[in-house]
Amino acid sequence: MSVTRDDVAYIAALSRLQFSDEEMATMTTELNSILHYVEKLNEIDTDGVEPLSGIHDQMNVLRDDVEKESIATALALQNAPDRQDRFFKVPKVIG
């Protein structure tokens, strides 16, 4: 399988990218190189090789959740740059 200039143009349009003619040629060459490498990987005999989900068998070590008393509201707001009543006041970020 090989990638054509039209394929790159199609992918670029889907990605909302614009390439110059030189960049288009470079992308076509690079994508073909990647596909060629993947094709070589497909030639490797993996019969009898167990699938691997990680490089070692260690698991995350998590501590048990412990209920604790939370910090007092006044103490939490003590260094707040701006507040309103019992709440942190932050700039509006959603239209």
Image (cartoon, rainbow, N blue to C red):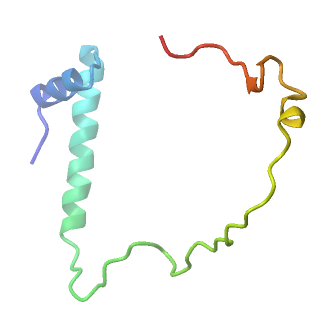
The answer to whether 60 appears left or right of 80 in the picture is left
Position of 56 relative to 43 (above/below): below
Q: At 28% from the left edge and 14% from the top edge, which residue is drawn?
A: 20
- Single out the residue that lies furthest toward the front: 85
The answer to whether 94 appears left or right of 28 in the picture is right
Q: Find residue 22 and report its image quarter.
A: top left
The answer to whether 62 appears left or right of 71 in the picture is left
Q: Position of residue 58 (x, y in %)?
A: 56, 79
Q: Position of residue 53 (x, y in %)?
A: 39, 72
Position of 26 relative to 40 (above/below): above
Q: At 20% from the left edge and 25% from the top edge, which residue is drawn?
A: 14
- Single out the residue that lies furthest toward the bottom: 48
Q: Position of residue 37 (x, y in %)?
A: 26, 55
Position of 34 relative to 52 (above/below): above
Q: At 14% from the left edge and 25% from the top edge, which residue is drawn?
A: 10
Q: Position of residue 9 (x, y in %)?
A: 17, 23
